[in-house]
């Protein structure tokens, strides 16, 4: 007797193999995604620090206290569909949390009385969750 098609056992075996492969692949894919977000966050923090230093050197450190200040003065690009003068949308978004980084404070200092500024982000218990880990 010559039948066409697959038996129930064959179909269940294929489904079981696919389930095992999916179980193995899912954590690997999620790990790559998390690493990518972490790298984006580090790159964004580096960009913000560089923009803050440039702002402080050009127009003075009092004008560069938050990420939003840097966006308003065009030292950082703003998010799509936003203008630098807009107050109702996020200038910079945290890739890890999805929240706004606009209110993140920036501390500018001239170590050893040099002419070169260094930018850091204050770390305290009151630091907003979207600003933690910037240093």
Image (tube, grey):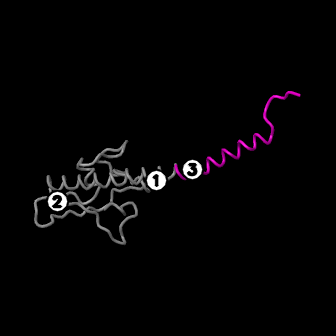
Q: How would you rate the neighbour count of disc 1 (Cα within 10 Å): few for under 14, some for 14-19, many for 20 or more?
A: few
Q: Which residue is mark 3?
A: 26
N-terminal-most mark, 3 or 1: 3
Quarter occupied by residue 134: bottom left
N-terminal-most mark, 2 or 3: 3
For discs 2 and 3, the disc positioned in front in the rendered view: 3
Residue in view at x 35 percent, y 51 percent: 92
Q: Is residue 2 magenta?
A: yes
Question: The residue tagged with tag 3: helix, strand or loop?
Answer: helix
Q: Nearer the viewer, residue 61 or 21?
A: 21
Tell me the quadrant of the picture where the C terminus can be found. Answer: bottom left
- The x and y percentages for residue 25 are 57, 48
- The x and y percentages for residue 7 are 81, 37
- 9 vs 97: above or below: above
Q: Is residue 22 magenta?
A: yes
Number of disc labels: 3
- 2 vs 82: above or below: above
Question: The residue tagged with tag 1: helix, strand or loop?
Answer: helix
Using the numbered discs, state the Cα–Cα distance from disc 2 to disc 1 in whole angstroms.
32 Å
Magenta segment range? 1-28
Residue in view at x 12 percent, y 67 percent: 112
Using the numbered discs, state the Cα–Cα distance from disc 2 to disc 3 in whole angstroms.
44 Å
Q: Which residue is mark 1?
A: 34
For discs 2 and 1, the disc positioned in front in the rendered view: 1
Prevalent SS, magenta region = helix
Tell me the quadrant of the picture where the N terminus can be found. Answer: top right
Q: Which residue is mark 2?
A: 117
Locate residue 128 relative to residue 115 in the image: left or right: right
Locate residue 97 relative to residue 63 in the image: left or right: right
Using the numbered discs, state the Cα–Cα distance from disc 3 to disc 1 in whole angstroms.
12 Å
Q: How would you rate the neighbour count of disc 2 (Cα within 10 Å): few for under 14, some for 14-19, many for 20 or more?
A: many
Q: Nearer the viewer, residue 62 or 113?
A: 113
């Amino acid at each position: 007797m010559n039948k066409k098609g697959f038996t129930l056992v064959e179909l269940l075996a294929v489904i079981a193999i696919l389930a095992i492969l999916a179980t193995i692949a899912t954590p690997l894919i999620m790990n790559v995604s998390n690493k990518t977000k972490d790298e984006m966050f580090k790159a964004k923090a580096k960009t913000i620090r560089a923009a803050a230093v440039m702002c402080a050197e050009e127009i003075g450190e009092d004008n560069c206290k938050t990420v939003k200040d840097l966006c308003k003065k065009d030292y950082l690009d703003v998010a799509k569909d936003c203008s630098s003068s807009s107050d109702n949308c996020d200038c910079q978004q945290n890739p890890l949390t999805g929240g706004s980084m606009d209110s993140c404070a920036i501390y500018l200092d001239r170590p050893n009385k040099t002419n070169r500024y260094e930018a850091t982000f204050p770390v305290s218990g009151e630091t907003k969750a979207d600003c933690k880990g910037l240093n």
